[in-house]
Image: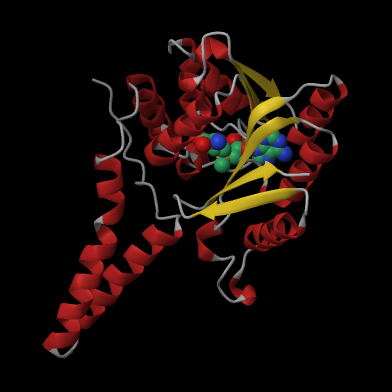
Amino acid sequence: MTSITELPPARPITPHSILVAQLQQTLKLAQQQNVPAEILDSLQQAVQLAAGLDPYLDDYTTPESSALTALAQRTSQEDWSKRFSDGETVRQLEQEMLSGHLEGQTLKMFVHMTKAKRILEVGMFTGYSALAMAEALPSDGQLIACEVDAYVAQFAQACFDTSPDGDKIVVEVAPALETLHKLAASKETFDLIFIDADKKEYVEYFQIILDRDLLAPDGLICVDNTLLQGQVYLPPEQRTTNGEAIAQFNAVVAADSRVEQVLLPIRDGVTLIRRVA
Ligand SMILES: C[S@@+](CC[C@H](N)C(=O)[O-])C[C@H]1O[C@@H](n2cnc3c(N)ncnc32)[C@H](O)[C@@H]1O
């Protein structure tokens, strides 16, 4: 009999799920104190309203494919800390990096809406968003995924090999900046570009994409984690290095007259950018 190791459940990493956890903790504390019933009642309503949102969004969003469910399950069953301490991954990875059902379905919608045929993903991890977008591509469409870590690249490839849409994905194992320069040198262009790799390099990815014309005319850039757990609008002294990098990235995009953008509060924040000049 094989024993399945119990791994920790995913921790809250979006502004909304962090807020839910904080409200639940506040309610617990209030229940232990002699707090007036009126305040307890109000807190309980706040918890209900906040905690119900994510499950409701999941319930009323088209379900993910069986290939995506399998990939997400495999990702959550992997002991990423052990992979890192054994030297198999180049950095500490974690299951929370996977974008998941709501964002995956949102990206699929963008692929359909833009009629994209060529997609570039910067930061693939185990391949959830890559496979979600590939599922929306026509049969002659292609997605190039940049990933620096050879272990996760292999992990993702094994999942793609068992999916009907996996053959639309080509994985480039190298630092993303290297791959972006290589693609630009061979004059490649993309209808949709999804940025989700090293937060400290986001400004560089954005600038190379625009300066070296990696984005096709009328193309769309989608950028993940642009709320970075709420750190971008919390007092700057509470920001991590990644929080600071994303705050700077958002400011750079907002000041660039070549583009227009909208920051959507989906999961950890997704910014859509299109070129206007
Ligand atoms: C947040 S995860 C990507 C999640 C994935 N897009 C998804 O939705 O499931 C970020 C990934 O970017 C990779 N990464 C980090 N820095 C990178 C770099 N400089 N070049 C290429 N990949 C990088 C990490 O190894 C990690 O797998």
Residue at image position (49%, 16%) is: 160
Residue at image position (38%, 36%) is: 101
Q: Residue furthest right?
A: 185
Residue 35 appears at what percent x and percent y?
18, 89
Q: Quadrant of residue 196?
A: top right
Residue 110 appears at what percent x and percent y?
51, 33
Nearer to us in this view, 101 or 81: 101
Give the side of residue 139 with respect to residue 277, left or right.
left
Q: Quadrant of the C terminus?
A: top right
Residue 246 appears at what percent x and percent y?
65, 57
Is residue 199 visible from the viewing direction of this image? yes
Residue 172 vs 113, above or below: the answer is above
Is residue 32 visible from the viewing direction of this image? no
Residue at image position (45%, 56%) is: 14
Residue 222 vs 157, above or below: the answer is below
Residue at image position (40%, 27%) is: 74
Nearer to us in this view, 3 or 14: 14
Residue 236 appears at what percent x and percent y?
64, 74
Nearer to us in this view, 213 or 55: 213
Residue 170 vs 213, above or below: the answer is above
Q: Residue furthest left?
A: 37
Q: Quadrant of residue 109?
A: top left
